[in-house]
Structures are given as structure tokens and as C-alpha cells.
Amino acid sequence: MPPPGAGRGAAAGTSEDLFSIVIRADESRIARDRWSNPPKNEFVRRWAEAPLNLAARALSLGAGALPSDWMCRLQDAVLQRFSHPHSRPFDRSERLDRAVGLVRRVEDGAGGPAALLAIISHPPLRDRLKYMNFELVRHATWVLRQLRGRPCRPRFVVAVDSYALDSVGVAEEALYAGFMGHYHLGLDRMALARPFLSGLALAETSRHRFPRRFVASLLAAGEVGLALAGGVDTTTRVWYAVPEWLAACRRRSPLAGRPAEVLGLLRGMEAYRAFEAGSPQWARQRSVWRRMDAWLMSAMEEPALAGRGEPSCAETGALAPPADGVARLCLEALGWAEPDRARAVEELADVVSRETPYRARFFRLVCGRVLKRGRPVVLVPVVHHVGDNVRIEVGTAWAWKRLSSGAVEATSALGMDWRGSAEDFALRFVRDEFR
């Protein structure tokens, strides 16, 4: 894996600096637990990665020209091969029937097609259930096609960076990124770390261009699948949960519009000065808010970043020192009153304990850039269950019908009407449907 910031120039001051916290901690865990990933051939990366990216991208264009039924059958066969002998039967229960009925009612009311969004759970990637990742995509594809009721071409949000593909060689990585990144909705969280030519070939998959492609698919009434957790549990808790919690705290802060004052308060804290001195690559962000993100994210992974053997908060899902202390200091710098800080830290502990984050920013994106433009959205959970009866089930589908006076008007497949903010919906939906 190339070091963060290599390739097309330093990534200083970007979100990729923060993602390098996740990478560094995971590298420490790999060494600690003696996992084995194949070595990356840097000669192949330097001379063959970009041509392989381009060849796979051309193949994706050809695949896009084929009938959607052909591609879906081919994808199903490939995914079944990877999950064999653990393939699970599709969920043909009344929950699917109710979801289909919901789509028809919403489309009749809107006078046009709805965007379909399968929200998928994310299984562990390094234990006996790792095959479930292939099964969830296979089931979500089938569910989306059942909901649409006609031939369609579901697209999935897939990570195509070298961190996500660390278990394969460079050639396989390059081919996967080129094909999946363009046939589906590829997301490269390390775009600035790519060699120049590979970066050009995969420019559409960069973190900054991804939202445009994702939104365009939904606005065109497409069928999209997305794992809300976005990766392994540590990535979920550090990369998604922490910044979202801090963002919510900033919005409720009396110093929300005064970043210079917040930075002064941070630098008056001995713990933050130690972070700046010890982790300059993460503390030298252009945004004060991003510096705060980096501080708490680092605290969540502190044992791993320090090379110690004990599990971090990101691994255990239990908020503990030093992360809880840093969280309180962040709230102090944001001007929160002492009585309110304990309640906010309890909210963080809840977020960190979950396998699936609430992802309020994601729901705001769909609300503000899809629903606001008049396109109704049907969200259907596709969730795996473990235990004695390992299975995949369709959850309770919800339809976002319209945005009225800034509030989402929604109805469930069970006939329940709801009205409120995208953030409140995220809390309700994720709590009800995911662990």
C-alpha cells in the first residue's frame, strides 16, 4: 500500500489525511494479529496499474451496453461462486410484498418512478461470515429488481482504494478498481495517494466526485445499493461515527461560527498541544473542525497507533480512555456547559457501540439533493442475521414522498406516516433495522 500522501502530491489538509489514521491503526492490528496480506508489487503498480485501470474501464463500458438481465445473471453466478457453499435463499416473505406495494403506491402518487435505495448491513470481513458480503450484494440486487418490477441495472457503492483491496495483488486491485469503479459507483478514499496516471484513469471515483455520481443515479430514478456501515467495524466507528458526532456537537455549540476562538481554546489544553507535537501530519489541517476530528479519531485508535497490544475503542465498541477524555475536552473547547457534556458523551458512547452508524450526513445528502428536487426515494433494508439460523431478510421499507417546509414526509410499508428531519429519520430507521 502506498503511504498516504504519495503519488499526485501531498494530501495535507484533506480528508485523506484523516483516513490515514484508519490505515495506520489497521496496519498495526495486522502486525499484532499476524494477518497475512499478499505483498504489493511496486513494479506492477508503477508500470501496469494505469493500463489495467483503463482496460477494465473499457470493459465496464462494454458491460454497460449489454442487456441488464445478462449482467445481473452473470453477477449472480459470480457472487454465488464466491459465497459457495453458503448461499442463502431469497426472502420472499410478506415484507417484500409490502415493499413492492409501497413502491407502486408512491409512484402512482408521484406520477413517475421513484429512486430505489437498498440499505445493506455489513458483515465481519475476517471471520467465518466473510462470505456474507457477497451474499448481501446478491440479495440486494434481487430485491431491487423485484421492487422495480422490470429489467433494471442496480448499481452498488463499492470502495476501490488500496486499503479496501489490501487482500489482493496489484494487478487484481487495478482491474477491480477500473471495472467496479465505473460499472458500479466506485469510491476511492485514497485518491490523492494514487500514482498520477492511475489517478487520471480513476478520477471519477475520487471522494470529491463520488457524491455527484451517487446523486445523479438517484435523480435518474436508478436502483442503488449501499452498505451503511461502509466497511469494517473500526472504520465505521472512527471514519463515520466520530466526525458525525462532532459535527452534531458543533451545530449545537455557542462557538459554532467562531473557529479561531475554538482553536485558541484547544491550544490552551496540554493534551491538545501534545497531540499537535506528536502527530503533526494529522494536526496541521486547514480547518479547525478537521483538527478536532483528527484528535478524537486518533484517541479512538490510540493503543493501535502507539503499537500496543490491547484493543482500541474502535475495536471494542466501548468508549474508554483516552477517547472519552478527549471527547469531553472537545466539548469544552466548543463552549458546552459542564452539565450538558455528560449527556453528549453518552450519545457518543451509543454511536460507538453500534455495528451500523446512523450516518445522518448521508440521509441529509439524499434529502437535500434528491428529494428536494422532486424525486421520491424508497429505502429498503437488506439485513443479515447471525446465530443458529444465519439468514438475510428484507426489513421494513420506507418511502420518502416529498419535502414539505423543510420536513421529510414519509410512509412505511406498514402504512405508518411520518414527518420530520432527515437526521431524525436516520436515528429511527437505523435503530429499528440495524444493530
Image (tube, rainbow, N blue to C red):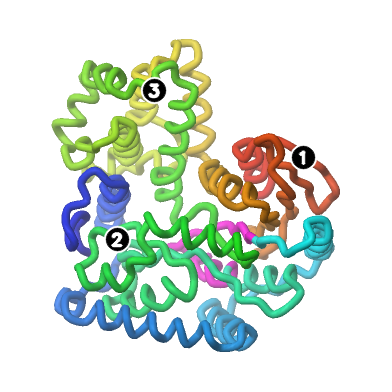
Q: Dot 2, crowdedness within 10 Å: few (<14), some or many (≥20)?
A: many
Magenta part of the chain: 117-136
Residue type for callout 2: Ala
User: Above or below — where is 430 with respect to 27?
Assistant: above
The image quarter containing residue 77 is bottom right
How many marks do you count on the picture? 3
> What label sits on residue 191 in the rendered view?
2
The image quarter containing residue 44 is bottom left
Q: Which residue is mark 3?
A: 257
Left or right of residue 297: residue 126: right
Q: What is the CA distance from the residue labelled 3 to the residue labelled 1? A: 32 Å
Between 92 and 333, the residue placed more toward the observer is 333
Q: Dot 3, crowdedness within 10 Å: few (<14), some or many (≥20)?
A: few
> What label sits on residue 418 in the rendered view?
1
The first of marks 3 and 1 along the sequence is 3
Between 191 and 115, the residue placed more toward the observer is 115
Seen at 33% across and 66% down, the residue is 203
Residue 212 seen in this snapshot:
yes
| Label 1: which secondary element | strand
User: Above or below — where is 133 with respect to 11?
Assistant: below
Quadrant placement of the N terminus: bottom left
